[in-house]
Image: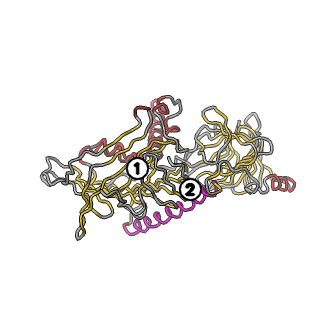
């Protein structure tokens, strides 16, 4: 049980360490270096830690971070995403960038030159690889790479660091310099005439991706608003909600925005939301079922609520030790998992049931455990019904491909006052990368990447159909099609690893 709890906690947790860094606009020749290989930039590809971006003469790019911060990359510039996390930084290796920084509470943003570091909380600036910093709005702490020498650069000022690592006193921008800056960056974000990498079947890919993000922000904003009302009523103040997001393609080639959120309605409850948004969904019958699915915009949601029998600490970094210390005294009180395409719903409800009470099939329990019941579109799946068949399944194991399919035994659905329905579930499962390609075992065994970086490029897709025994659809929208990324689990693992590192460093320091 202890292992189960730790696994569920890790699965449901997200942190703002998984920043969404992407190229939102290209013009001219722009390259991305990933795993020491340079290739043409593509606005559909997310940028990860240690990736580099390089622009040629008369070329430029715009980077977006969490849809809040803009980085304008000038011509003949090379920069590296040294760390895409909550406390990460970007390195400018050559050329010049301009940044307009907007951060959430507790976040940091740093730009490193060969000899200096600019630490920003929220401002607009221009910085070069020649260690010159111009602050257009706000204030910036400009220091050497060791943090030993600092200089405060205010709005309208220029600061420099010499190659010796010594800072010069900040000076005011001259009128000529202001005019030159305005001309240099004039219309930089205007995409008119810019080259968009990749076109979606019905038009501008960048516009679709931005539309998906905007729609998701509105949905999440409403969810968070409802949660805040709950907190005000219960007078609970918890650690900030955490989230991760990624734009990718599904196995059918549709552009998808996946958002994951951890909400804490009260000190005993965790709610994990996985939202899969497509502006134009088209299903391709890869398995030969012969099924059709309506096309168009859709939102598929998985909502998992886990209520424990005792409070959890406010800080996530305290959870593993706390859960371990409680042993078998701590267990889930209730679990509810709901999957919906906004018309059709599959739901699983589990409640902690004591020894001697009946289980799902009415048999007496020999020990305490969770007892589950399943529901499809409001009908309860009869756990006592035995259709006498075992269903069918298949997978790509022989070719080393990571996909599988299954057809369930016939199930009986019951609902008060309505005739019973008899159905089967048809399921497709795929492990995919960000361009929708199905992964192979070799993708896992042959990679030399950091595991955290690798996991941010893969996802799982599950497609579920519910069909009546006469082969007509029991789902109004044809299927449920959810994509789940490991981003939240990666985020908590990174956060816990950082915490362990800080503890070890502290212990080492005290021992010395």
Q: Main secondary structure of the magenta part?
A: helix
Q: Is residue 442 toward the left or the right of residue 357 in the image?
A: right
Badge 2 density bin: few <14, some 14–19, many ≥20, Cα 10 Å: few
Q: Residue furthest right?
A: 176
Residue 224 magenta-highlighted: yes
Q: Is mark 1 on a helix, strand or loop?
A: loop
Viewer-nearest of labels 2 and 1?
1
Q: Where is residue 61 in the image (x, y as percent from the top left)?
A: 71, 48
Question: Could you give the CA–CA distance between mark 2 and mark 1, rounded to whole angstroms?
Answer: 46 Å
Q: Nearer the viewer, residue 387 or 103?
A: 387
Residue 315 visible in rendering: no
Is residue 213 magenta-colored?
A: yes
Q: Residue 289 carries which label?
A: 1
- Decide: few, some or many residues near mark 1? Use Cα within 10 Å; few <14, some 14-19, many ≥20: few
Are the residues at dot 2 and dot 1 in contact (C-beta closer than 8 Å)?
Answer: no
Residue sitting at 40 percent across and 63 percent down? 476
Left or right side of 236 for 491? right
Q: Of the residues under marks 2 and 1, which one precedes in the sequence?
A: 2
* Residue 475 percent coordinates (x, y): 38, 61
Helix, strand or loop status at disc 2: loop
Range drawn in magenta: 208-233
Location of residue 242 in the rendering, given as x and y in whole percent from the top left corner: 47, 53
For disc 2, the marked residue is 104
Q: How is the image coloured?
A: secondary structure
Q: Which residue: 65% across, 54% down?
A: 101
Q: How many dots with numbers?
A: 2
Depth check, front residue: 353 or 419: 419
Q: In which quarter of the image is residue 87?
A: top right
- Against 121, is 220 above or below? below
Q: Can residue 405 be seen in this view?
A: yes
* Residue 293 picture location, percent across and down: 45, 58
């Amino acid at each position: 049980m202890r292992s189960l709890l730790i696994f569920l906690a890790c699965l449901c947790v997200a942190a703002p360490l998984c920043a969404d860094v992407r190229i939102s606009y290209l013009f001219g020749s722009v390259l991305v270096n990933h795993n020491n290989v340079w290739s043409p930039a593509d606005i559909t590809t997310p940028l990860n830690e240690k990736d580099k971006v390089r622009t040629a003469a008369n070329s430029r790019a715009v980077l977006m971070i969490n849809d809040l911060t803009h980085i304008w990359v000038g011509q003949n510039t090379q920069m590296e995403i040294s760390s895409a996390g909550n406390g990460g930084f970007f390195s400018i290796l050559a050329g010049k960038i301009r940044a307009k920084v907007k951060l959430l509470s507790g976040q940091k943003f740093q730009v490193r030159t060969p000899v200096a570091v600019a630490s920003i909380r929220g401002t607009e600036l221009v910085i070069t690889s020649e260690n010159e910093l111009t602050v257009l709005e706000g204030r910036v702490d400009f220091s050497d790479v060791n943090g030993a020498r600092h200089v405060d650069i205010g709005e309208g000022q220029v600061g420099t660091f010499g190659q010796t690592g010594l800072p010069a006193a900040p000076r005011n921008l001259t009128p000529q310099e202001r005019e030159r800056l305005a001309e240099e960056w004039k219309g930089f974000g205007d995409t008119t005439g810019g080259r968009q990498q990749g076109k979606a079947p019905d038009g501008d890919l960048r516009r679709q991706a931005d539309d998906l993000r905007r729609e998701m922000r509105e949905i999440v904003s409403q969810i968070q608003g409802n949660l805040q009302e709950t907190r005000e009523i219960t007078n609970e103040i918890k650690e900030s909600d955490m989230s991760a997001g990624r734009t990718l393609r599904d196995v059918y080639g549709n552009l998808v925005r996946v958002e994951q959120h951890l909400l804490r309605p009260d000190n005993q409850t965790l709610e994990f939301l996985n939202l899969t948004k497509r502006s134009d969904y088209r299903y391709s019958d890869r398995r030969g079922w012969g099924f059709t699915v309506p096309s168009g915009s859709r939102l598929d949601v998985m909502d998992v609520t886990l209520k424990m029998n005792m409070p959890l600490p406010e800080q996530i970094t305290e959870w593993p030790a706390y859960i371990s210390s409680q042993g078998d005294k701590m267990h889930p009180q209730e679990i509810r998992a709901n999957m919906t395409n906004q018309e059709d719903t599959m739901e699983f409800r589990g409640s902690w049931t004591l020894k001697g009470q009946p289980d799902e099939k009415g048999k007496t329990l020999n020990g305490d455990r969770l007892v589950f019941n399943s529901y499809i579109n409001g009908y309860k799946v009869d756990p006592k019904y035995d259709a006498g068949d075992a269903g069918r399944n298949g997978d790509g194991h022989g070719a080393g491909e990571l996909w599988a399919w299954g057809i369930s035994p016939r199930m009986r659905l019951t609902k008060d006052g309505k005739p019973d329905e008899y159905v089967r579930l048809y399921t497709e499962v795929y492990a995919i990368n960000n361009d929708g390609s199905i992964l192979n075992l070799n993708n896992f065994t042959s990679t030399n990447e950091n595991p955290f970086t690798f996991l941010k490029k893969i996802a799982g897709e599950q497609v579920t159909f519910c069909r009546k025994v006469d082969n007509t659809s029991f789902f109004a929208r044809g299927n449920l099609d959810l994509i789940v990324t490991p981003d939240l689990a990666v985020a908590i693992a990174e956060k816990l690893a950082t915490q362990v590192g800080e503890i070890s460093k502290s212990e080492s320091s005290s021992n010395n």
